[in-house]
Image (cartoon, helix red, strand yellow):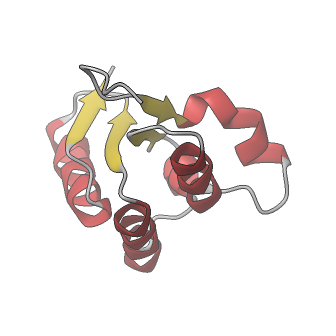
Amino acid sequence: MTQLPFTLYLHSYSLRFHLRHVPGFDALALIDFAADHGFDGVCLSANGPNYRDLGSMEPARFAQIRARLEQRGLLCDLDTSGTDPDHLRTLLGVAQAVGAQKLRTY
């Protein structure tokens, strides 16, 4: 297979209905899906209650996500909304905990 000159991420928004309505499909299943389909990484939304697609605000959950990313060899970015410095500082900590290389805001 030819190596592409870019990395290809699967954004959790692409499977938002799976994440909300398919029992058992969560961030870990999304990571597995991305790895199984040849993606280089995932972008997870960390907005709203329980940081939306992360599924929890607990450090143990962040550790699970990080471990799965490492196990599957995937990169990760997080996204959030807002530019409040306290919010961004908090989310930078979450990004570090899950092993995300970037935090995007809009």
55 relative to 7 in the view: left or right: right
Q: Is residue 103 above or below residue 13?
A: below
The picture places residue 87, in percent across and down from the top left corner, at 26, 44
Residue at 14 percent across and 38 percent down: it is: 85
Give the quadrant of residue 44: top left
The picture places residue 89, in percent across and down from the top left corner, at 16, 49
Residue at 56 percent across and 48 percent down: it is: 53
The picture places residue 21, in percent across and down from the top left corner, at 84, 46
27 relative to 91 in the view: left or right: right
Looking at the picture, tell me which residue is in the foreground, 36 or 45.
36
> In which quadrant is the N terminus drawn?
top left
Residue at 58 percent across and 59 percent down: it is: 55
> In which quadrant is the C terminus drawn?
top left
Give the quadrant of residue 71: bottom left
Give the quadrant of residue 37: top right
Q: Is residue 65 above or below residue 88?
A: below
Please tell me how many numbered marks the rendered image carries. Answer: 0
87 relative to 34 in the view: left or right: left
Q: Is residue 52 visible?
A: no
16 relative to 65 in the view: left or right: right
Residue at 50 percent across and 33 percent down: it is: 10
Q: Is residue 106 above or below residue 60?
A: above
Q: Is residue 82 above or below residue 54?
A: above
Q: Is residue 23 visible?
A: yes
Residue furthest to the bottom in view is 60
The picture places residue 73, in percent across and down from the top left corner, at 36, 58
